[in-house]
Image (tube, grey):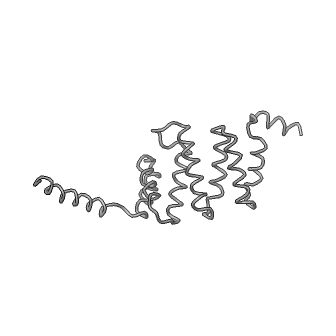
Amino acid sequence: MKKVFRTIPIIILGLIFTFCSSKNPSELYNSAMKNINEKKYTKAVPELKNIIKGNAKSKLEAKAIYELAKLYHGHAVKSISQKESLQEAVKYYKLLYKKYPKFEESASALFMAGFIQANELQNYKAAKETYNQFIKSYPKNELVTSAKEEIKNLGIPPADILKNKILK
């Protein structure tokens, strides 16, 4: 019993030290961006994810989500396969759109999710749904024409698309 009472203060001190020494979202974001600039992606990813774990919505969280999506899209995290990385990119691009539809990068993020689904994952059904959501959500965006063209050409090999354009 004495042993238990001796370990409780140690645990409490450990928790206090952990919470007091943890970085705030702004410090985490700055550190993550520094790590990205230094190509230390495996250090940046957990920092960005820690920003997202917070419950408060903020522009900083939106930026963190966007940076994560870009890192996964570029397959910067080498501990997972290319396919898993692309799936994570789609997840974060769509999360950005869902949580922050008015954020400056949300429209291009949703378009990129569709593009990855269509052209890199060959998931044409999901791509069509994503592109249609993009067109519906951002009807005046400059990428709407591209989204419509992508839908029209889903599943068609690039060589065939070019051949059809040349023949017109």
Is 13 displayed left or right of 149 in the figure?
left
x 59%, y 52%: residue: 93
Quadrant (top left, top right, bottom left, bottom right) of the C terminus: top right
Residue 158 falls left or right of residue 68: right
Residue 133 vs 163, above or below: the answer is below
Point 27% across, 59% down: residue: 15
| Image location (x, y in percent) of residue 25 | 42, 63
> On screen, 5 above or below 56?
above
Residue 158 in which image quadrant = top right
Residue at (10, 55) in percent of width and height = 2
Q: What percent of the width, then of the height, locates residue 45?
A: 45, 50
Q: Residue furthest right?
A: 168
Please tell me in which quadrant of the rendered image residue 23 appears: bottom left
Q: Residue furthest front?
A: 1
What count of labels does the image hold?
Answer: 0
The residue shown at (16%, 55%) is 7
On the image, which quarter does residue 79 sit in? top left
Q: Looking at the picture, how far across and down is residue 1, in whole percent?
A: 12, 53
* Residue 165 percent across, percent down from the top left: 84, 40
Using the image as rendered, state which of residue 8 and residue 138 is in the foreground.
8
